[in-house]
Amino acid sequence: MAIRKILEFPDPRLRTKAAQVETVDQRIQTLVDDMFETMYDANGIGLAASQIDVHEQVIVIDLSSDRSTPRVFINPSVEVIDEALDGFEEGCLSVPGFSESVERPKAIRVTALDRDGTAIDETVTGLLAVCLQHEMDHLQGTLFVDYLSPLKRQRIRQRLEKEQRRRA
């Protein structure tokens, strides 16, 4: 396993649409392992492969405080079950240090493959639904800042660019 570099906004690679995974094989399982290690190292609860510059439809999520419930979603697809929106304070490993309220559907049905290529088909709500929708946005080249006003997005961009120049 390896910790991978997480791309940060406004890196244009974050806007790349991810391709479907053709075969769940050892390469994908190694990617999944690396993604969990990277996510845990960054104290995150979700990570899309696009965030580590691998543009394939792979998402890892673990909402537990003790890292005991890792979930993998390969080639995920969602259907909105409850059109009602809920606002959640969202942060992102690719937009470090910022969080904002984003409204998303309360309940979704997700179909995907797990780490072993076994089909998943379940209805999810709450934080898992929010996290899954957030990570699926990454696979489409969308970030949570895209849901914010242009002014807020520009301020975040400027502060992150300044921080990135300082670190360089």
Image: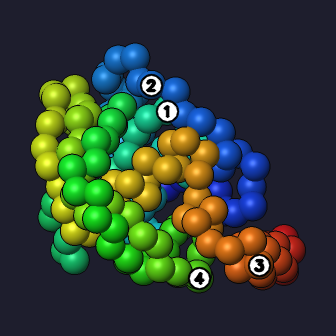
- Contact check, label 2 and label 3, Cβ < 8 Å: no
Looking at the rendered structure, the secondary structure element under dot 4 is strand
Q: Which of 110 and 27 is in front in this view?
A: 110
Q: Distance between the residues labelled 1 and 2?
A: 6 Å
Label 1 or label 2, whichever comes before in sequence order? 2
Quick check: can you spot residue 167?
no
Looking at the rendered structure, the secondary structure element under dot 3 is helix
Label 4 or label 1, whichever comes before in sequence order? 1
Q: How far apart are marks 3 and 4 (CA)?
A: 17 Å
Outermost residue on the front side: it is 83
Answer above or below: position of 21 versus 89.
above
Residue at 59%, 52% in the rendered image? 142
Is residue 61 found left or right of 100 in the rendered image?
left
Please name which of the two marks, 1 or 3, marks the residue nearer to the observer. Answer: 3
Quick check: can you spot residue 143?
yes
Q: How far apart are marks 1 and 3 (CA)?
A: 31 Å
Q: Residue 151 carries which label?
A: 3
Q: How far apart are marks 2 and 4 (CA)?
A: 30 Å
Answer above or below: position of 59 versus 87.
above
Please name which of the two marks, 3 or 4, marks the residue nearer to the observer. Answer: 3
Q: Mark 2 points at which residue?
A: 20
Amino acid type, callout 1? Glu
- Contact check, label 4 and label 1, Cβ < 8 Å: no
Residue at 38%, 46% in the rendered image? 59
Q: Residue 97 carries which label?
A: 4
Outermost residue on the top side: it is 22
Q: Position of residue 102 (x, y in %)?
A: 47, 72
Q: Nearer the viewer, residue 72 or 144?
A: 144
Amino acid type, callout 3? Leu
Q: Which mark is residue 56?
A: 1
